[in-house]
Image: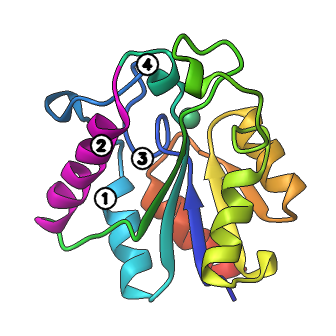
Amino acid sequence: MIKTFFFDRDGVLIKNYGYVYEPNKVKWLKGSISAIRYLNKKKIKVAVITNQSGIGRGYFTEKDLEKFHLFLNKNLKTYGAKIDDFFHCPYHPKAKIKKYRKKTNLRKPGNGMLLKAIKKYKINPNQCFMIGDEKKDFLSAKKTKIKFEYKKKYSLENQVKKIIEYL
Ligand SMILES: [Mg+2]
């Protein structure tokens, strides 16, 4: 029984054109909004796990990211969907901004963000699932013993439904 669903953000839920933080550039990928709504209806928690080195690199700020995530949920609300939580990692070993310059297990392929979520919600990795589009997502889930699938080319809603209905 899956109780929490983790998604990588860029390339899974929204189009990845690199360092995405501007609301007017959001493009939801096929079936992503309905996938989230489906999980909401099933009372399965939805959380985003996202590397955001653009903060450390000085492209945008924590505040910008926070605003962007609020915007995503405002947008989702019009479709009756909601992301329950966002976990992001602003750090990068070569960040331009000193306070964000470090090597950390929070950054995928590390699993610090997933561990944080597990601790916050007191959930069992067994009851979690993750979808990502890159090897670092897979490695992060693997380290946490969380079941994982790469994002498929077809609708995310269909992919998620298959996982929930046949697992
Ligand atoms: Mg991605």
Residue appearing at x 30%, y 49% in the figure: 69
Query: On the image, numbered disc 1 is attached to which residue?
Result: 33
Q: CA distance from mark 4 to mark 2?
A: 14 Å
Q: Looking at the picture, which amino acid does disc 2 mark?
A: Trp
Which of the four quarters of the rendered structure image does ligand 1 lie in? top right
Residue identifier under label 2: 28
> CA gap, disc 1 to disc 2?
7 Å
Asked if labels 3 and 2 touch by Cβ distance under 8 angstroms, the answer is yes
**Mark 1 C-beta closer than 8 Å to ligand 1:** no
Q: From mark 2 to mark 3, how far is it between C-alphas?
A: 6 Å
**Which segment is the magenta one?**
60-78
Do the residues under discs 3 and 1 have CB atoms within 8 angstroms? no
Front-most of 88 and 40?
Answer: 88
Query: Please, what is the three-letter code of the amino acid marked with disc 3?
Result: Leu
Task: Please tell me how crowded label 1 is: few (under 14), some (14-19), or many (20+) other residues with Cα within 10 Å.
Answer: many
Q: Is residue 63 magenta?
A: yes
Residue type indicated by callout 4? Gly
Front label number (3 vs 4): 4
Q: Is residue 102 magenta?
A: no
Q: Amino acid at mark 1?
A: Ile
Structural distance between the alpha carbons of marks 4 and 1:
20 Å
Mark 4: secondary structure = loop
Colour convention of the picture: rainbow
Q: How many marks?
A: 4
45 left or right of 151 in image:
left
At a point 49% along the width and 15% down the height, the residue shown is: 57
Q: In the picture, residue 50 is in which quadrant?
A: top right
